[in-house]
Image (cartoon, coloured by chain):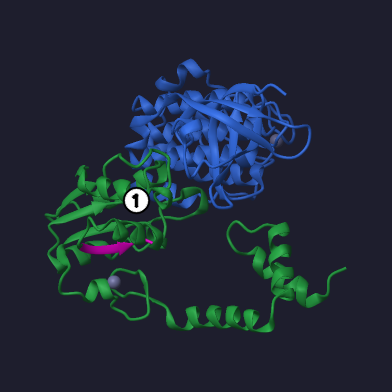
Chain colours: A green, B blue
Amino acid sequence: MLARPIKNLIRELRKLPGVGEKTATRLALHILTAPPERAENLAHALTEVKERIVPCKECHQLTEDSPCAICASPRRDRTLLCIVEDQVSLISIENSGNFNGLYHVLGGRLSPMDGVGPSSLNIPDIKDRVRNLGVREVILATNPNVDGEATALYIKRLLEGTGAAVTRIARGVPMGGDLEYADSLTLGRAIDGRGTF
Amino acid sequence: MPGELDLAFVLRLVPYRDADLVVTLLTQHHGLISLMARGARKSQKRFSGALDYLTLIRATFKKPRSGMGTLTAAESARSYEKIRGDLAGYHLAMHFFEVTRLATREGDDANEPFLLLGHLLTLLERGGDRTSALRIFHLKTISHLGYAPSELACASCGAGLHESEAHLHEGGLICPPCGAGSGAPLSKGAVNSIVRATALPYENFSSFKLSMQVEREIGPVVEAALIRALGAEPRSLEQLHEMLKA
Ligand SMILES: [Zn+2]
Ligand SMILES: [Zn+2]
């Protein structure tokens, strides 16, 4: 029988994505047997990240300062807007070095089975951003799977009449795959090879 | 253990751990199964990029007597490209997948739901009427769950319902006296459409068309009956309404 505080910790760890009972138990026991300062550091890092990190009011990426460094930078091309599902995609594209515009982070993709529609994502404000920034091209870099394609299609419809060209990243990224696993080189090529959508 | 081979629709994909996917399939001969697709989010080489919604796949899998089986290979037998490129069609198809998953249990014979999905997706792929497809699907699912709305008799008292108004309750169609107190009954035309859609042969799917007036009458009633039969409201329903309006 495990003591209540350990059970508590396991229960909290299990709420993390991809963590099952076994992994949660292993992590909990690891934390328990590690030196006390390790646990303190972890607790501190967790609290700090929640206190200090906010979504950028412009692009919704997670940042310490809002607007974020990318949105605030005078060196970025403000007429190019790349729409990504999440922070991970943003980082991958940023690492490819092939893009110098601004981003817009959706916070997910359409997922009807989970009840996720456009209003649960950072979609409604895209049109205003495109207008206010005077964006000439919107690059849709959602994942190349059925839900990601539907999300791209929805945004494309939304942007009709804004005058911005809408492009989609090239299919260099394997169909059905997760952008999270596309290496920066592939992703860079996909951005360069983007086409009208 | 040699792998099993079957045709299947992907009903649900859930990321697992870092790179895996738990895939829920509706197979033609093995019913509903959940399988682990290892590494599928990292590389779809073994799955030839076919592991996604709106693809009919040829799945090879290993199913142990207990515990979760493994999807070892998949290839596309058919891809529904037109539906993928149509937002309303996409939402409709995702609703079909969710409801089918809610309505089926592992171990059930699912050949009929499998054929139903196949015919409905073909109908949508060919540009068939979406609302009619939706109601055919709902009524056939309600019927498959054992709540057959039949015109033969009132599900409560057994009175004949031929050319009659009626109510649609969880048990099926109910005659007006038995349904007294539950609002206005459905018109004869609406009852007729419900009965026809429930029994509609696959080959007649494309010629079945609900009028706007009948749809307005039966839509909410059919959905309420479906939710009662499923015991849960499908999460895809709200978005679907939005998209069908647009
Ligand atoms: Zn920003
Ligand atoms: Zn009766």
Residue B92 in sight from this viewpoint: yes
Q: Nearer the viewer, residue B151 or B32?
A: B32
In the image, what residue occupies the spot 22% across and 58% down? Answer: A99
Whether residue B186 appears in this view of the structure is: no
Residue B174 percent across, percent down from the top left: 66, 37
Residue B177 appears left or right of A59: right
Name the residue at the front extreme. Answer: A35
Residue A142, relative to residue B32: is it above or below?
A: below
Q: Residue B105: where, in percent of width, then height? A: 69, 37
B137 or B44: nearer the viewer: B44
Magenta stretch: helix, strand or loop mostly: strand
Q: Is residue B34 left or right of residue A151?
A: right
Q: Indicate which quadrant contains ligand 1.
A: bottom left
Q: Callout 1: residue from which chain?
A: A
Image point 18% across, 51% down: which residue?
Answer: A160
Question: Where on the picture, by quarter, is residue A164?
Answer: bottom left
Residue assigned mark 1: A142
Quarter of the image for residue A92 reads bottom left
Q: Which x, y percent locates residue A47? A: 54, 82
Residue A128 highlighted magenta (yes or no): no
Check the image and report above or below for B186 versus A180: above
Query: Which span of residues is magenta-colored?
Result: A101-106
Q: Give the amino acid at mark 1.
A: Thr
